[in-house]
Amino acid sequence: MLKESTELVLGADPANRQWLLNGTSAQQDILLSFRGWQYTAFYASVSVAGSGSGSEQTYVHLARRLLTRKTWDVIVFEDYPQVTDDGHNTIQIGICRGDGTIHLAYDHHSSQLHYRFSQAGVATDPKHVVWDSSIFTTTLDTLPGTVAPITNITYPRFLAVDQDMMFSYRTGMAGLGSEELYTYSSKTGKYVSVGTYLEGNDNNPYINGLDYFNSRLHVTWTYRDFVPFEGWDKSTGVQHKQQAGPNGIENNHDLWYSYSDDLGRSWKNDAGSTIAELGKGGSVRCDKKDIKVFSIPKGCGAHNQEDQVVDHEGGVHVLNRDTMDGHMQWKHYYRTPQGTSIYPLLPFLLSDDVFCLGVWGQSPLPNVTALLGGKRGVMAVTKQNDIYFVLPENRGTNSGDKSAGTLTILKATKGGKFVDYELVWTGGCYSSEPRVDRARLHDDNVLSLYLRRQELDSHLATIVVREFDVATI
C-alpha cells in the first residue's frame, strides 16, 4: 500500500458555482513539473463569494513552487473575470521547453480564444523571474504568428514536443465538430496551423488525450453522433453551450486510434497505412479503414475524454468504460508496442475489429465501480514502466457535478503484463476528476494529484495537490 501522503493547499474552490471548473478530465496538463519546479492553475475568487449560484466572479490563478517547498507563489490575473457557470470552461497550461514560455488557455465552450503567454525564460530560469502578471501578455484572441481571431473553441490542450509545443482544440459543437492542430516553435515564438487532423462527419471526435513518444503522436477517441435540435443551425443558438447540452453521452460509440510520425502532417491507421495528409486536404474521418479498434455501440456507456497514456516502450493505454460485458465497468484498453506479438496480451480480451501492427486488448478494472456519465479517471506511467490508475468514486451521473466520494488508486506492472491490478490506496473525500503530474511520477517516483477536496458537512471545497511517494511500494 502507498504510504501516507503530503497535501499542499492551493486555495478555495468557487463556492457559488453549480458545476466544476477546477479538476476535469479535459485538463490534460493542469499540473506539471519542469526543471525542479511544479506549475498549476485554478479558478478562485479574489474577495468574499457572491450570494447566489453562478453570481461569483472568478479569476485565473497561476501557481508555482520549488519542488522542495510546500508553499506556492501565485499570480492572480484580475484583468479577466470568468463568469460562466459551465464545467467546460477550464484552464489549460503549456510549457515550451525550448524557450521557457508558459502558455495559458481558459474559459472556452464554443467561444472565442482566450489565451495569454509569458516572456521567454520564465520556466527555464525561474529563480530570476519576478513572479507577477507583468511577465504575461493580456488576454488574446489570436495565437502569435496568426492573424485572424480564433473562434468556436472548446477543450484546448497543449503538448510539449521536444523543444517545441503543440496546441489542439475542438471546433464546432457536441456531435458536430472537428479537432484542429497547431505547432509552436521555440525558435520563432510563433504558431503555425497544421490543419484539421480529426474531421467530424455528422459527429465529433472526443479525444482521450494527445501524447508524444519517440517522435510519434498518438491519439485515441470516441465519436458522438449528431442529433439535430431546434436552432442548431442558427448563429444565435446557445443550447449546445451548456454543461449538459442536447447531444449527450448516449450518442457516443466505439474506440478509435491513429498516429502520426511527422508532427501531425500525415496520419496512419492501426495497420500502418497513411490515411490522411493534411497538406493535401486530407483528414482522419470515421470512414477511414482500420482506425476503429473496439466496437462499442451507442447506448453502451463509452465516455468522452476519459484518458490515455503511452508507456516507455510505445504501448498505448486507454481508460474508458462500457457495458459490453452486461454491466458498466471501467476498462483498461491496451495496444502493444508496434511489432510485438500477441502473446504478451493473452490475459486481455483481444479485439477482433482490426489487424494491426500492434495488438489491442481490454481488461476490466477491479475494486472500482463505474457509472454511466460519472466522473472520469486518469493514468500515469512510472520510470519502471508500471501504470497507476487514479479513479474517483462514481456517485453522480454527470461528470461535471460536485458529488464527492473516495479516491481509489490501482497499480499494474509491466512484469504482470499490465493486468495484475493491485489496490494500493483508497480514501479521502474528493469532488473533482483527478489530474496527475506525469513528469513528477516519472522523474521523482512521486504520484502528484490535483484534487478538489470536499469539506465535511459543508458545500465548501479546497483545491489541493496530494502527493504519494511510490518509490518503496
Image (tube, rainbow, N blue to C red):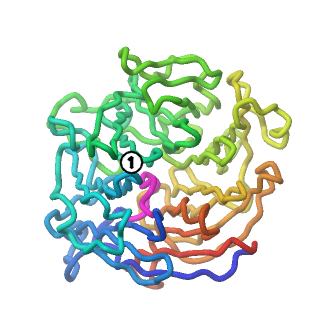
Q: Which residues are magenta?
A: 22-31
Q: Which residue is mark 1?
A: 157
Left/right of residue 96 with respect to residue 330 in the rendered view:
left
Regarding residue 61, the answer to whether it shows in the image is yes
| Quarter-of-image position of residue 259 | top right
Image height of 201 relative to 443, above or below: above
- Measuring from the top left, give residue 221's x and y in whole percent: 52, 37
Left/right of residue 357 with respect to residue 120 in the rendered view:
right
- Measuring from the top left, give residue 186's x and y in whole percent: 34, 46
Please, what is the dominant secondary structure of the magenta stretch? loop
- Measuring from the top left, give residue 177's x and y in whole percent: 35, 31
**Residue depicted at 78% across the width and 51% down the height:** 419
Q: Nearer the viewer, residue 82 or 445?
A: 445
The residue sitting at the top extreme is 280
- Measuring from the top left, give residue 343's x and y in whole percent: 86, 35
Image height of 245 relative to 466, above or below: above
Question: Neighbour class for label 1 at 10 Å: few (<14), some, many (≥20)?
Answer: many
Q: Nearer the viewer, residue 369 or 316?
A: 316
Q: Quadrant of the C terminus?
A: bottom right
Confirm whether the magenta stretch covers residue 29. Answer: yes
Confirm whether the magenta stretch covers residue 164. Answer: no
**Residue depicted at 29% across the width and 53% down the height:** 105
Q: Quadrant of the N terminus?
A: bottom right
Q: Amino acid at mark 1?
A: Arg
Q: Nearer the viewer, residue 247 or 188?
A: 188
Q: Secondary structure at mark 1?
A: strand
| Quarter-of-image position of residue 53 | bottom left
**Residue depicted at 57% across the width and 64% down the height:** 392
